[in-house]
Image (cartoon, grey):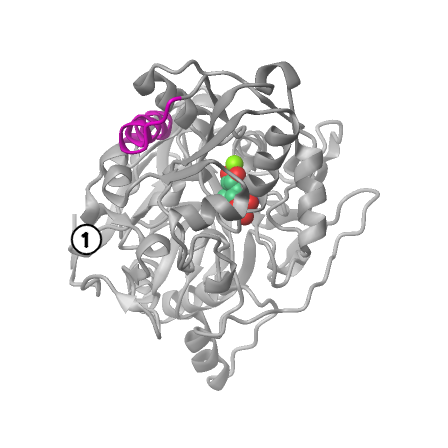
Amino acid sequence: MVSILTISGRRGAPTVVSHPQVSDPITGQKPDEDCAVVGYVGSRNAFPFLLTGLKSLQHRGQESAGIATFDGSMIRIKKGMGLVAEVFRESDQSLKDSLPGNIGVAHTRYSTHGSKNLENAGPITISNSIGYIAISHNGEITNAVQLREEMKKRGSGFITSSDTEVMLMEISRNIIELGINAGLRNAVSRLRGAYACALMINGTLYALRDPMGIRPLMLGQVGDSYVIASESCVMDILGGSVIRDVKPGELIEITPSGYRTVFIASTPNTAHCMFEYVYFARPDSVIDGSEVFSARIQMGRRLAKEYPVDADIVIPVPDSGRAQALGYSQQSGIPYGEGLIKNRYSERTFIMPTQEQRANAVRLKLNPIKSAISGKRIVLVEDSIVRGNTINYTVKILRAQGAKEVHVRVASPPIIAPCYFGVDMKTRDQFLARGKTLDQIANEIGADSVGYISIEGLIESIGLGKQGLCLGCLTGSYPVPIPGEKYSFQSELENYQNP
Ligand code: 5GP
Ligand code: MG
């Protein structure tokens, strides 16, 4: 008998927010999201580890949070809309009892439009003749629409609009036909795009990463237990250690007694997302051997070499521009200072639907310190400019506080093309930098000058080489074939290596 107990919802707040579902004009897909995944298997109760893991990765997704555990006979899942601490209240003692078991997977979700509802929140679970399966997925399956149509013709039904459900159904069908290991291998050969996953099949945990390694995934150890997580900071915070990154294309099977590689679906190139280093990941994480903080310092240093300017003070747009501003200051010798205070309780500005709402939200988020700004020639360092809302407003408030000059320096090259692999930058018309010269941009945002780090400068700062990174949003050329877009290199699965 199969029974899945689902507990959902968030106390005192409506759980479901519906928005019209927008399809991408090129791929026809629903916009998707970047997210955090965590998995645990070991000798202890999984829930507290998964909860701390999710809290450590809250920056990767604030829309919903969920945890699924398996106690040897039954899977249980709780998920809800909102922040991790809102969905899982520390004071709720019953939580630990309602999510028993020494294995589990967890997920936070970040999406910006499309369907923001509880069905699409992770982890997603099903039961089939093999047993219980739960998946937490970070990334975006680029051929999800085709796979869904194929499966529908064969009689499958879908509950959510999420590509993760398509992936789960593909895995389910294949492991029933071929057994778990061969089934997972076959399922992976049919999936395109980005996926870093924590997968639980009954009492076994699996770490699965797409063949290009687009999104990050780590394997770690806490005492005698194993943890997988999107970022290495989770292992630090749990008092454990990183064993290693999950390799691109690798499936690792993990039980309380150890782990082993089941297969590696290899490709000639990797395509780690450069935006993880620019903005997404925590600076205290190390991803694929490159520490995010050091990469950001290097980006700032490089920017100072590429776009030097005579000024009195280097100010970051907090928080994500801090390390880059520090690097700029170190290289240029211009003192670093704080000039903008960020309200850490304000809502995210990036996702607001109207321009007016976004402008108001940025105002709530950032406020200047008058004495640090008045009469100064300022270098304002920002990690990235997407639509330009943040920078536009920031330059204006610095001017309003009497800044003598404002020189904007951006630690990512101009973003000019959509992301299909999990960051919410979906249509070309939204990008501030598209089709404009630096002078035009400076003019538009009211800055005295603007400089963006070069693509070469970014690559060298990250230190993984050009062939190792996905630069799709900077070049419009992608590591995975996308209909209507340029394809940067041969990336079909070439072979499978058995360990
Ligand atoms: P813009 O305001 O130009 O549209 O977006 C750039 C600003 O938002 C930068 O300050 C950057 O740190 C931040 N940002 C960039 N990408 C994202 C994202 O995917 N989500 C959120 N919340 N902020 C982002
Ligand atoms: Mg920022």
Q: Amino acid at mark 1?
A: Asn
Give the image quarter of residue 265.
bottom left
Q: Would residue 295 be counted in the magenta stretch?
A: yes
Residue occupying the far bottom of the picture: 153
102 horizontally vs 78: left or right: left
Q: Nearer the viewer, residue 483 or 171?
A: 483
Q: Which residues lie in the magenta part?
A: 289-310
* Residue at 59% from the left image edge and 50% from the top image edge: 74
The residue lying at 50 percent from left, 28 percent from top is 405
Per the picture, the main secondary structure of the magenta-coloured stretch is helix
**Quarter-wise, where is residue 240 in the image?**
top left
Q: Which residue is mark 1?
A: 269
- Looking at the image, how many numbered discs can be counted on the residues? 1
Q: Nearer the viewer, residue 264 or 200?
A: 264
Of 494 and 305, the residue lying toward us: 305
Where 228 sits versus 318, above or below? below
* Element marked by disc 1: loop
Question: Is residue 251 covered in magenta?
Answer: no
Name the spot of residue 106 as percent of width and height, x first.
54, 43
Return the residue found at the far right.
12
Q: Is residue 33 left or right of residue 413?
A: right
